Image (cartoon, coloured by chain):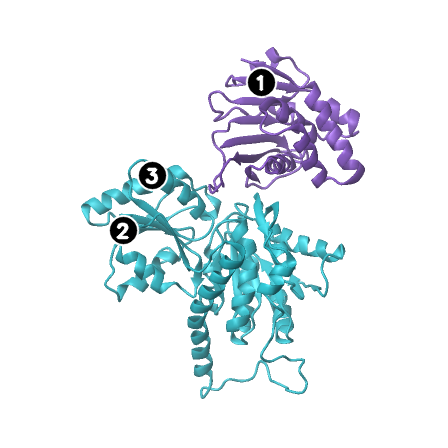
Chain colours: A cyan, B purple
Amino acid sequence: MEYKPIKKVISGNYAAAYAARDARVEVVAAYPITPQTSIIEKISEFLANGEVENLQYVPVESEHSAMAACIGASAAGARAFTATSAQGLALMHEMLHWASGARLPVVMVNVNRAMAPPWSVWDDQTDSLAQRDTGWMQFYAENNQEVYDGVIMAFKVAETVNLPAMIVESAFILSHTYDIVEMIPQELVDEFLPPRKPLYTLTDFDNPIAVGALGTPADYYEFRYKIEKSMEEAREVIHKVGKEFGERFGRDYSQMIELYRTEDADFVFMGLGSLMGTVKQAVDVLRSEGYKVGAAKVRWFRPFPKEELYELAKNVEGIAVLDRNFSFGQEGILFNEAKGVLYNTDAHPLIKNYIVGLGGRDFTVSDVKKIAENMKGIIEAKKLDREVEWYHLKR
Amino acid sequence: MIEIRFHGRGGQGAVTAANILASAAFLEGKYVQAFPFFGVERRGAPVTAFTRIDEKPIRIKTQIYEPDVVVVLDPSLLDTVDVTTGLKDGGIVIINTEKSKEEVLEKLKKKPAKLALVDATTIALEVLGLPITNTAILGAVAKATGVVTLEHVQKAIQEVFSGALGEKNAKTAAEAFKKTVTYEL
């Protein structure tokens, strides 16, 4: 069947809901929280209108229970999905470890929202990045199309390596922004993403299994190692699945870091998610003004794209890491990871951290231009003026 | 790229207007983006919403600071909000009002290159029976900017509101299109 996309003008949240529908999710359990709620509302609407077959929606009393229900459903062999934001994700924290430890390919959309207090509903990546060590894969979407594509690919990757995956989109900047999304006809999604074939299920009574058993010091260690082996395997699976997606639907996701105009670049801007759309626009402007700059959008934060980062870092003089997040007592989280990866290599460009856009502070093309100006000076001087800059700080 | 800013009050449908305009431009084969001001809206409070329209994909993810077009859904906002903030030179202002060109210009801090006036509230009351002006104002946007045709506005309206409600709203837009008066300044 020839690929003819179904184009619609929809929000990032609706893109997530349509993708869950097209992935034929079987169980959805969720609790409302701004700005995630319209994902689950839309899925409820599909159910009410009879637009989905074979979907069980489980209303729950908290996000902790939402993830618990997804874990139970996934252990029973179902394709399970949920969505949350900020405080809701934090409340799920314990259960996130449960999903990965039990090797269950649950897929969740997290709408990045700043952690309270003070209360904020706006974009900030700290909520999802703080779940770094839970054993979940993390994919950051630049636009609504990537939210849709990301959810569908995430199920395929997750079900191949038996680990859960989180698709991350920005509060309002994607979740409530309408944009053109090419959706894939159901038959073609079905070909790309066949029904889940779990290795073990709680409901296979001929082959009974124990879930949630005790892991004594004699065995626990190897369980952890196996999670890491699967995370490593995920890099290759992501490459293959992203390539296959590109061949079928024209949007290639084989690279864990998307490079934009980096060939001959003196320095690059590196970051996660929606702010990289604005950065790409700024790169075009800066190129037209004679700057040799590019953008490196980190699509997958877990597993971390070590090889790609090294290949990039070898060929540039500087990297400006843009973090819409912060780890108190240290620095921006992506910056911290990037430095860590490069330490034991021979690639040591000048690398500076800019803390931008926390709590939804707007990050514009003119901000990127000011940072470019600063980076240019750093490269000329061959040394950093400072390692971490709180870029927007009111003085 | 054309950037449009809508000013309304919570409940009047400014956000829906921005989305419908994007859908109408999409029907013309354009690339589009529409979003609310990323705030915490309340019924009756001043709200803003935005639409971007371009010939190529729109990557920028920031708010709009220098609009080409400003659309005002509620006449009382002219007394409390500087609706022309950042308006580009050569920009267009479209206002729902029963007042005259002179009265309106007195309230605008920046004189636009083109002003379009329509009494959208009266039209909405007559056709819809409700003072919700978002679909009426889109008729005025089609007329004053030419960025989208009335037909595409009507089609986009009917994608959002189905059945009789959609037809009424499409008719509201057509009425407003007819009654919008534009002034080159």
Q: Secondary structure at mark 1?
A: strand
Chain letter of mark 1 equals B
Relative to A339, is A46 on the left or the right?
A: right
Residue A68 placed where, x, y %?
62, 70
Instruction: Name the residue type under label 1.
Output: Leu
> What residue is rendered at 49% in x and 34% in y?
B64
Between label 1 and label 3, give the one nearer the viewer: 3
How many marks are shown on the rendered structure?
3
Quadrant showing the C terminus of chain A: top left
Chain letter of mark 2 equals A
Q: Which residue is mark 2?
A: A318
User: Quick one: which residue is furthest to the front in this view?
Assistant: A1
> What residue is rendered at 43% in x and 67% in y?
A235
Instruction: Name the residue type under label 3.
Output: Leu
Q: Which residue is mark 3?
A: A286
Residue B73 placed where, x, y %?
64, 27
Quadrant showing the N terminus of chain A: bottom right
Q: Which residue is mark 1?
A: B115
